[in-house]
Amino acid sequence: MDWACRFLLDRQQEDGGWDEVKAVQALNPPEWMTPGRIETRVWLTAYCAHVLIRFGYAEAPGTYCPTDFLLAHCDESGRLAGYLRATWIALPMLAFYPGPDSEPFRRALAVVEANYSPDWERTWPGSCAAPRMLGCRPITPWSPAALSTWSASSGPTGVGNPRTGRSSPSAPPSRRCGC
């Protein structure tokens, strides 16, 4: 897992976000994988931050804080630009920094709860379980159910299309989180 996390960290951009590699363009990717689109960058940043938190790389040396990028692309309601699931996937990052009692986390959580669909539990269940993993109380009543079904429903990689939720085949820091 260390090599996979290092791979992600090596591709983080100075603004704290991630983007698809330009070589993907030659493969005629779906809209949600198109490099350079803000919608792509936002969901990919939320997902990379989520993975890095899960494996203990939330504040790896030489990295930037993904929250800075995510909050720069967040509306007043707390929803991130682009795909709604990006807001859900970003909850662990927002719970980590600025924290579960912060206004950005509470607003994002309200957006997710107001727009939640039971279909999400079959497609992206790991995202709703992360606050428990971080030592926080489950944030919604469906978090424990998602934990129990996650391995069976997410497939071997847990990766899927952020738009539909279906599985897919498979520099020094400017400011670290919390500083």
Image (cartoon, rainbow, N blue to C red):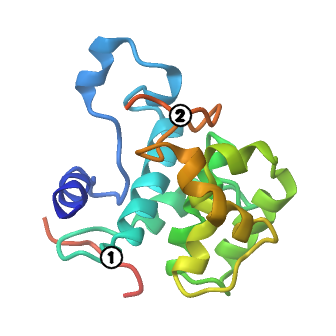
Q: Residue type at mark 2? A: Ser
Q: Is residue 78 left or right of residue 21?
A: right
Instruction: Please give the count of numbered marks on the rendered protein.
Output: 2
Q: Residue type at mark 1? A: Gly
Q: Does residue 175 appear in this view?
A: yes
Q: Is residue 147 left or right of residue 33?
A: right
Q: Does residue 97 appear in this view?
A: no
Q: Quadrant of residue 71?
A: bottom right
Q: Is residue 74 left or right of residue 60?
A: right
Q: Earlier in the sequence, mark 2 or mark 1?
A: 1
**Which mark is drawn over residue 167?**
2
Q: Secondary structure at mark 2?
A: loop
Measuring from the top left, give residue 10's x and y in whole percent: 18, 55
Measuring from the top left, give residue 129's x and y in whole percent: 61, 68
Q: Which mark is in front, 2 or 1?
A: 2
Q: Nearer the viewer, residue 172 or 53?
A: 53
- Vertical comparison of 20 with 96: above or below: above
What distance separates the C-alpha of mark 2 from that of mark 1? 25 Å
- Vertical comparison of 159 with 71: above or below: above
* Residue located farthest toward the right when viewing the structure as drawn: 114
- Quarter of the image with the C terminus is bottom left
Residue visible at 70% across and 64% down? Answer: 108
Identify the residue position indicated by label 1 in the image: 56
Residue visible at 26% across and 27% down? Answer: 22
Q: Would you call the spot at circle 2 few (<14 residues within 10 Å), some (14-19), or many (20 or more)? A: some
Measuring from the top left, give residue 138's x and y in whole percent: 70, 78
Residue visible at 71% across and 51% down? Answer: 121
Measuring from the top left, give residue 74's x and y in whole percent: 62, 56
Q: Is residue 9 left or right of residue 167?
A: left
- Quarter of the image with the N terminus is bottom left
Q: Would you call the spot at circle 1 few (<14 residues within 10 Å), some (14-19), or many (20 or more)? A: few
